[in-house]
Image (cartoon, grey):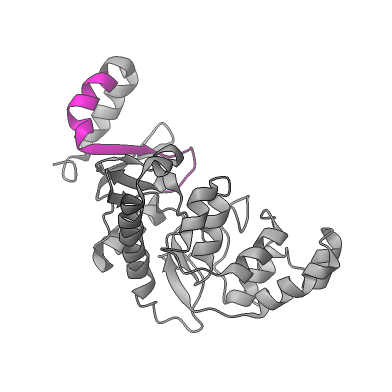
C-alpha cells in the first residue's frame, strides 16, 4: 500500500509533525508494529542505502528490511521500510547468553557474512573498491569528512589510510614507533580479494529475538572492499566490548596482522584520493 501511495505517506509525515507525541503512541501500536521510518540527517542521501538493501535481498537470504518508499520532508529523507522483529543485540545481553545461545547466534552470523562474501563482484577491471552503485564509500575509518573513493585498487585505499604518505613518512609524521613501521609496510603490501562487505558489523546493527538473528540493519556503509576490512572495521566499531571482540573471529574471517596495522594508523584523516595515482 505504501509503495503505491506516496501522497498518503507525505500527509502522514505532516500529521506527525503537528501532533507528535499523541501520534507516536498511536503509531507504535498500529502501523509502527510493521513499518519502521528511518530519518536521515539534512543533506544525507538515501540512494546508496536503499539500493544496497535491495541488492542484498536479491543475492542472499539475509533478513534485511524491505523498502516501501522514500520521502523528503523538511530537508530530511524518510525511508519507510519493514520493521525487523526483535531488538538490537547489546553487550549486557551478550554476557547473559549461555554458550549454546552464543554459538547459535554466531553460526547464523557466519552464514550471513559468508553469503555476502560469495556474491560475485561486478566485471570491473580492475575490481574497484566502491559502493554498490560504483560510487564512494561512507566509512569514517577511511575518512571522517564524507564518503570517499571509489578506489581503483587496494594500494590506493591504503594510501588513503596513510593520508597520501609513504609508510615511512606517515610513521614519522604521526609518531609511530620505528619498530612498528615494518608491520604496517608488510600489511599494506598484502593484496586481498574484493568482497561484498556490510562494513558496520556492530551489536547495534544485529537484531535478535532470543537466540535467533532476525535481521542485519544499517547498510549505508556497505560496498565492495578488501576481504580483511570487515574484520578490521568490526574490531574498531566495538573496541570496548572485549567479550564480543573475542567472538568476532568466529563468524568473520580474522586478519590479525592487518587489524594490528590499522590500529597503529588510527583514526581516519582527510585526503583527496586521485584515480590517476
Q: Which is more toward the observer, 11 or 190?
A: 190
Q: Which residue is farthest front?
A: 99
Q: Which is more toward the observer, 48 or 82?
A: 82
Magenta segment, which residues?
A: 23-45
**Quarter of the figure with residue 219:** bottom left
One can see residue 232 in this view: yes
**Quarter of the figure with residue 149:** bottom right
Where is 202 relative to 161, above or below?
above
- Residue 274, how many percent across, how many down? 65, 70
Where is 30 relative to 174, above or below?
above
Judge whether residue 27 is colored magenta: yes
Numbered-mark total: 0
Q: Which is more toward the observer, 44 or 204?
A: 204
Q: Which residue is farthest left?
A: 1
- Residue 11, how many percent across, how many down? 24, 28
Q: What residue do we see at 28% from left, 53% from top?
A: 64
Q: What residue do we see at 49% from left, 72% from top?
A: 227
Q: What residue do we see at 65% from left, 64% from top?
A: 260
Judge whether residue 142 is colored magenta: no
Where is 162 relative to 17, above or below?
below
- Residue 2, how many percent across, how many down? 18, 41
Point out the image quarter for the N terminus.
top left
**Quarter of the figure with residue 7:** top left
For this view, does 258 lie left or right of residue 248?
A: right
One can see residue 51 in this view: no
Amino acid at each position: 500500500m505504501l509503495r503505491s501511495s506516496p501522497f498518503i505517506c507525505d500527509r502522514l509525515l505532516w500529521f506527525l509533525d503537528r501532533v507528535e507525541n499523541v501520534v507516536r503512541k498511536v503509531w507504535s501500536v498500529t502501523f509502527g508494529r510493521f513499518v519502521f521510518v528511518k530519518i536521515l540527517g539534512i543533506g544525507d542521501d538515501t540512494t546508496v542505502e536503499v539500493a544496497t538493501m535491495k541488492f542484498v535481498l536479491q543475492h542472499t537470504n539475509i533478513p534485511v528490511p524491505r523498502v516501501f518508499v522514500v520521502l523528503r520532508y523538511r530537508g530530511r529523507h524518510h525511508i519507510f521500510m519493514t520493521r525487523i522483529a526483535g531488538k538490537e543485540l547489546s553487550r549486557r545481553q551478550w554476557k547473559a547468553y549461555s554458550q549454546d545461545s552464543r554459538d547459535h547466534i554466531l553460526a547464523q552470523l557466519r552464514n550471513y557474512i559468508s553469503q555476502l562474501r560469495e556474491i560475485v563482484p561486478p566485471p570491473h577491471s580492475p575490481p574497484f573498491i566502491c559502493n554498490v552503485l560504483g560510487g564512494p564509500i561512507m566509512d569514517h575509518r577511511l575518512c571522517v569528512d564524507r564518503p570517499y573513493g571509489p578506489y581503483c585498487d587496494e594500494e590506493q585505499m591504503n594510501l588513503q589510510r596513510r593520508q597520501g604518505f609513504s609508510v615511512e613518512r606517515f610513521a614519522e609524521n604521526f609518531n609511530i614507533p620505528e619498530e612498528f613501521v615494518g608491520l604496517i609496510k608488510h600489511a599494506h603490501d598484502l593484496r586481498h580479494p574484493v568482497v561484498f562487505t556490510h562494513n558496520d558489523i556492530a551489536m547495534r546493527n544485529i537484531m535478535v529475538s532470543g537466540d535467533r538473528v532476525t535481521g542485519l540493519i544499517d547498510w549505508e556503509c556497505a560496498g565492495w572492499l578488501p576481504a580483511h576490512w570487515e574484520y578490521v572495521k568490526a574490531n574498531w566499531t566495538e573496541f570496548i566490548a572485549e567479550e564480543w571482540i573475542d567472538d568476532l573471529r568466529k563468524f568473520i574471517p580474522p586478519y590479525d596482522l592487518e587489524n594490528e596495522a590499522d590500529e597503529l594508523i588510527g583514526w581516519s584523516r582527510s585526503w583527496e584520493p586521485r584515480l590517476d595515482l
